[in-house]
Image (spheres, grey):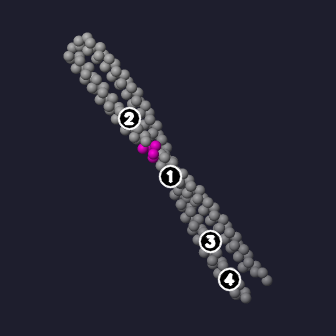
Amino acid sequence: DVMRCKHETEERNLRLTREKADLASSLTENEEELQEVMRRYKACVGAVSTDQITIQDQSLTIQTLECERNKLREQYAELCQRLDHMEGENVSTVQHKRLELKIRELESKLELEKTTKNRMDTQIMRQKELIEKMNREMDDLRLRDGTSQDDVKKVSRQLRWVDNDLCLFDLSFHFPET
């Protein structure tokens, strides 16, 4: 009877030792996964910060270009007014050609400004989409982080339970009930 009891306790000890090793391995894997999630999270935060700085810089550039465009429009309007005034005064052909050349130059600058503004607007939209994507990924990483922490807590509880069982087993093995 004692041999049978000893054999059962040895089997139980072996089973609990295996279970403890499995839980320790699982805990290690969960900790590694948590570190990987945190690394990705930090990378996403850094990328979002960089994108926000880029967007701020591009917004400032757009504002500057819009101011310059407005000035060019004012110059264009002024030149058109001067041209109209000069046409009424029998302006020389040379002056007239100079003014037409200046008008064409201002028109081409205005077109360039429009093109640049459209390009910047497109870049801003892309950056905003990228930020939204990064925010979604950060939310996913936070959710995974929370799940990983819950798993770590669960495994820790199971490990304590196994440790308690091993302690009880050791006590019952050393001091068997008579």
The rendered magenta stretch, by its main secondary structure, is classed as helix
Q: Earlier in the sequence, mark 3 or mark 4?
A: 4
* Separation (CA) of disc 2 from disc 1: 30 Å
**Residue 164 horizontal/vertical position (percent):** 70, 70
Q: Earlier in the sequence, mark 1 or mark 4?
A: 4
* Separation (CA) of disc 1 from disc 3: 35 Å
Q: Is residue 132 above or below residue 32?
A: above
Residue 129 part of the magenta segment: yes
Residue denoted by label 4: 8
Dividing the image into 4 quarters, which one contains the C terminus? bottom right
Q: Nearer the viewer, mark 2 or mark 1?
A: 2
Residue denoted by label 3: 20
Q: Amino acid at mark 2?
A: Lys
Q: Amino acid at mark 3?
A: Lys
Q: Amino acid at mark 4?
A: Glu
Q: Can residue 51 be seen by looking at this rendering?
A: no
Q: Nearer the viewer, residue 104 or 3?
A: 104
Q: Specify start and end residues of the magenta stretch as a single range.
A: 126-130
Pointer 3: residues within 10 angstroms few (<14), some, or many (20+)? Answer: some
Pointer 2: residues within 10 angstroms few (<14), some, or many (20+)? Answer: some
Is the Cβ of the residue at disc 3 closer than 8 Å to that at disc 4? no
Residue denoted by label 2: 117
Is the Cβ of the residue at disc 1 closer than 8 Å to that at disc 3? no
Q: Earlier in the sequence, mark 2 or mark 1?
A: 2
Q: Which residue is situated farthest in the right direction here?
A: 178
Q: Is residue 167 above or below residue 110?
A: below
Mark count: 4
* Separation (CA) of disc 3 from disc 4: 18 Å
- The dot on residue 137 is 1
Q: Which residue is situated farthest in the left direction here?
A: 93
